[in-house]
Amino acid sequence: MTQKRVLLFTGDGKGKSTAAFGMLSRAIGHGMKARVIQFVKAQEGVGEVLFFTRFEEVEWDHYGKGFLPTDPESPMMQKHLEAAEFGFEEAIDALASDEYDFVLLDEVCYAASKGIIPLEPLIKAIVDADDKIIVLTGRNAPQALIDVADTVTEMKMVKHGYEQGLLSQAGVEE
């Protein structure tokens, strides 16, 4: 039986999702059933999706439309809100389900911090979840998510290839 754990990866540095996917590989190695729900991101053809969806132990859905508009009143925000609403419902169901040992909510911290998903019902679902590993990622983690987690790691950007003009690359960012 899996002991409940809540781990959160946040900060402005690279590696939050990468760390979470490393944990996902460990879970699969131990025969755990996993559910991955991605918020905000729109990239379906990235390496982690291509790799992990090969495993029958992993159910994967993404509910993102890419970068959020800088203006929250933008008409484009509606498509982000609609996608996030579906993802949020799936996340709540996954946290309550006995079917999964491991639930990864990628970019959920960012989605909550930007108000595209409600924070309080998410906190309640995490608190009420039994016997599963819950991994949360994303920049700007709200304090309430930090408080509910038993392990929190903040990734700090010291230097990034984007600053030097390096484009996104398969095997690194994709």
Image: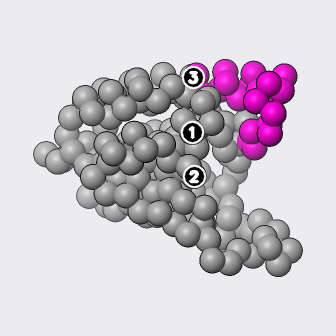
| Quadrant assignment, res 34 | top left
The amino acid type found where label 2 is placed reads Arg
Q: Residues within 10 Å of mark 1 (few under 14, many from 20)?
A: some
Image coords of residue 77 (percent x, y): 76, 27
Would you name the residue on which mark 1 appears?
A: 113
Q: Earlier in the sequence, mark 3 or mark 2?
A: 3
Image coords of residue 59 (percent x, y): 46, 39
Q: Are marks 2 and 1 in contact (CB under 8 Å)?
A: yes
Tell me if residue 72 is in the magenta stretch.
yes
Of the pair 57 and 65, the residue shown nearer to us: 65
Looking at the image, residue 142 sits to the left or right of residue 46; the answer is: left
Q: Earlier in the sequence, mark 2 or mark 1?
A: 1
The amino acid type found where label 1 is placed reads Ser
Would you name the residue on which mark 2 appears?
A: 139
Question: Residue, x 17% and y 48% (percent of image)?
Answer: 3
- In this rendering, the answer to whether 12 lies above or below 94 is below
Q: Secondary structure at mark 1?
A: helix
Q: Residues within 10 Å of mark 2 (few under 14, many from 20)?
A: many
The amino acid type found where label 3 is placed reads Phe
Of the pair 1 and 148, the residue shown nearer to us: 148
Which region shows up in magenta? 66-85
Would you name the residue on which mark 3 appears?
A: 86
Q: Secondary structure at mark 3?
A: helix
Q: Nearer the viewer, mark 1 or mark 3?
A: 1
Q: Earlier in the sequence, mark 1 or mark 3?
A: 3
Image coords of residue 152 (percent x, y): 37, 58
